Image (cartoon, rainbow, N blue to C red):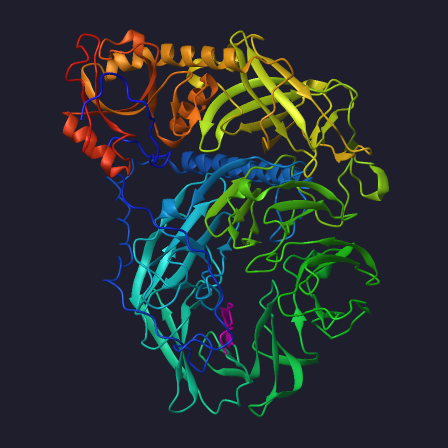
Amino acid sequence: MSHPGPPFEGGSGAPRPDEPPTTSQPAHPTVVPGAFPGSSPPPWQYPYPGMYPTPPTGPPGMGPPGVGPPGYPMAGPPPRRSNTTAYLIIGVALLCVVALVVVGVVWWRLSQADDPDLVDGQLAASYPVAPGAEWSITAASMGGQKFNSVIPSEGRYGTVGAIADGETLVTIVGDPYTSVGGSHWAVGVNARTGERWRFGEPVSTCADTIVDDSLVCRDADTLHFIDVRSGAALATVPAPPNTGGVAYNGDAAFVVEYVPATDSVVFHKITRDGPLWSRPVDNLPTAAPGSGDASAFTATDTTVVTSGLRVVGVSADDGDRLVAKAGTSEIGRFDDGTLVLETGDSDGMAVANRRLVVLRPDGTTAELSGDNAIVPASATTGQRSRMLVDGRYTDVRNGTSPWTAAIPEVDVFGSRVVLADDREVIVFDRSGSEYLALDTETGRLLWRASAGRNAAVSGHAVTDGERLITPTPDGGIAALDLYSGSPAWSLPPNVIGNVRVGDEPGPALTFALGDRLVTLTSTTITGFAPTGPRAIVPGTTRAGNSGSGGGGTQYVTPCGSPPVFTPQSFRTAAGGLVVTMKVTAKCPDGDVLFGPQTRITISDGGGLVASGSFDFRRSPLAVPAPDGGAALNLELTYPPGSFFRLPDTLNDANSAGGQYLVECDRGSTPERAPAVTAPASGRSSASSEATDTVFPAGADVTATSVNALRLQADADRAFILANLNNRWVAQLSSKHAGLVADGRTWTDQAILDEFLALRLRFNDVRLLWSDEWPVFSYRGWWVTVAAATFPGPVEANSWCRTQGFDPDHCFAKLVSTTAGPEGSTLYRN
């Protein structure tokens, strides 16, 4: 097969954008969304929750690290000094120490004077406007198909979930379900830095808590004590056979074994040094009716409880029996270690005399009337002993209830109290998939807001003290004002890496890790940096604010003139051209971006750079008042088709000196302009992606495309001369305006769009103008090549085949400034 000049057809089927096209790419696993099985229990389900066989795995990991070297001995006796001198030296030293201590205490008290006593589990900094992603990791990058919960009763059904402390989030990556025979690994990510790890040995489940930067995970026959800061193994010890999940209290791990022959359970306590004791619990009550596929297993400093169709609790110290009753899988846990267990009496067909057992840290128990108890995920100091019991706001210490919520037919299973402060108690009502804010003193309904169907799965909505940040019905996240329930901002599903499962959005969970907001979907973990100052305690008002409505919040309203957009940097990502803008309000009181079709066009002396329509209606953005140089850092993404240039053809925006013209056309806007929460600091951040390609009236798209192609070929020529000259490469495309191929007539804009799409999909491709290279016999063609070199044409064609290209879309081409067309092309058969 021969061809006299450049081929008529371009390439397709390129590798992933984050992988260079210099080697053959391995096959990547297909993401298979999780699906819930039917109501029948799976064949491997044991009669006691959490007791199911797990597959054997490879050899255990490392043992505990060795003890560090001893201190160095003194080199010799010190020289003799007089007693007087020694006393003087000691006296002076003591005075210095006392002075340092006093200064330190004074400094500490002063530094803590304005430091609020934030609620455990809340964000330490505020998010007054929508944040931009600071980092993200995907399941594929960690070697798995999806992220699964570390909790056995969730992960084996493919439920997304994670556990976290104030710094690290830990989840499991691997197959769609954490069931028998799968491949799964514990992974962790530091919320502040985005640094991540994957534990070296496979695991199927982990404990439900991280204690003192450590966690225990397990496979079929091994317990791994893991340092969550680095993913290193602190110890690896054998696990007793026929045991299921694992609980951990920092001192030891606990596993429980169901013994069918005697209808008893055996608790095992295991430290990093090995097994400590095994204690059976006999004479178990009749189990509650049900499949038993939901279970929970947890440990505090003093108690260990497993729950499902039976609730069994023992002392963490010696394994003494504390409680054994029929019940449910729900365990309410207070900050002081108090546990609330849902129990009753069962005859195997039904449960009667339902009541709550309060298991205190000292091992004593008390009973309260009620069927279902919901302990708040986050609570202020005054509310830390309160819970919702069948709609009654109840004090766990004495059972008193100041009010009963007027919530008709609340579906308790899956419902949550996400926050309890001195102003409101916010309940996620699963039956209506909505949030209900109830007055803390009276139970009166303050406001209600729609929520995502997965808001209560393995995680909670989180708060920064002024807003509730929660999953949304469409699979994104949003912030609701705690005082009024009104929307503050939202992020669409694509920003947090969410994917649809059939016709429904995939689950999206939110976590608070220090001052970082972290989202988790089935395929992506994303971290967001705060956009405002330090958080405040929920239910209080930020000092110095006197906003409307009594909520203590300041607002900005739209300005009559659009704000000024100044490009700061350009980069490319899988989604397109990303431009970081400094947005400055023209009005002294600030501005708001809120329209559904806001066109933002960037141009320079060469014509259009990018132009697209952005929808700020769902998530209005506050532009702060310009006093002191305040501005909004806005990251805009222009998808393929809406941009013409790449960063290597654009000058450094920071030193451009006004060479870029940015036009903001607000387009059609709602009749009522919104008032948006003002950023509490001088500089805030946000991101948005163009929803449509819109060019300004009178724009010459053809001239802009020709100029962009010319600029790109000029920019690539130096690279090609230095790296590709007289070498074989893979040619992916060659086109000229007016060419009819693939059922279409190619225009300059279409040629440019194809090149830019290839550039985004490949790590690196380059553009040539055939007139400038003697290896082409035809003139006036734009040619795209992959920037990988090969020893010969056979290897180049082999690369094309490996990448999945057909012979007309990728073949070997010699790039040279001295060779002619003869012998410079080799096509595949």
Q: Quadrant of the C terminus?
A: top left
Q: Quadrant of the N terminus?
A: top left
Would you say residue 359 is visible in this rendering?
A: no
Q: Which residues are magenta?
A: 292-307
Task: Give the percent coordinates (x, y) of residue 616.
Answer: 67, 33
In the depicted structure, whether residue 317 falls above or below residue 281: above
Task: Give the percent coordinates (x, y) of residue 482.
Answer: 74, 48
Which residue sits at x=43%, y=26%?
744
Would you say residue 426 is visible in this rendering?
A: yes
Answer with left or right where residue 532 lies relative to residue 270.
right
Task: Give the percent coordinates (x, y) of residue 624.
Answer: 71, 26
In the depicted structure, whether residue 251 falls above or below residue 618: below
**Residue 376 versus residue 622: which sits nearer the camera?**
622
Residue 400 occupies quadrant: bottom right
Which residue sits at x=51%, y=20%?
569
Task: Give the percent coordinates (x, y) of residue 107.
Answer: 61, 36
**Residue 827 versus residue 84: which sits nearer the camera?**
827
Residue 759 occupies quadrant: top left
In the depicted structure, whether residue 549 falls above or below residue 639: below
**Residue 733 versus residue 28: which sits nearer the camera?**
733
Answer with left or right where residue 259 lies relative to residue 820.
right
Answer with left or right where residue 446 lies relative to residue 367.
right
Residue 240 occupies quadrant: bottom left
Which residue sits at x=45%, y=24%?
753
Please state the total of marks drawn on the protein image: 0
Is residue 427 magenta-colored? no
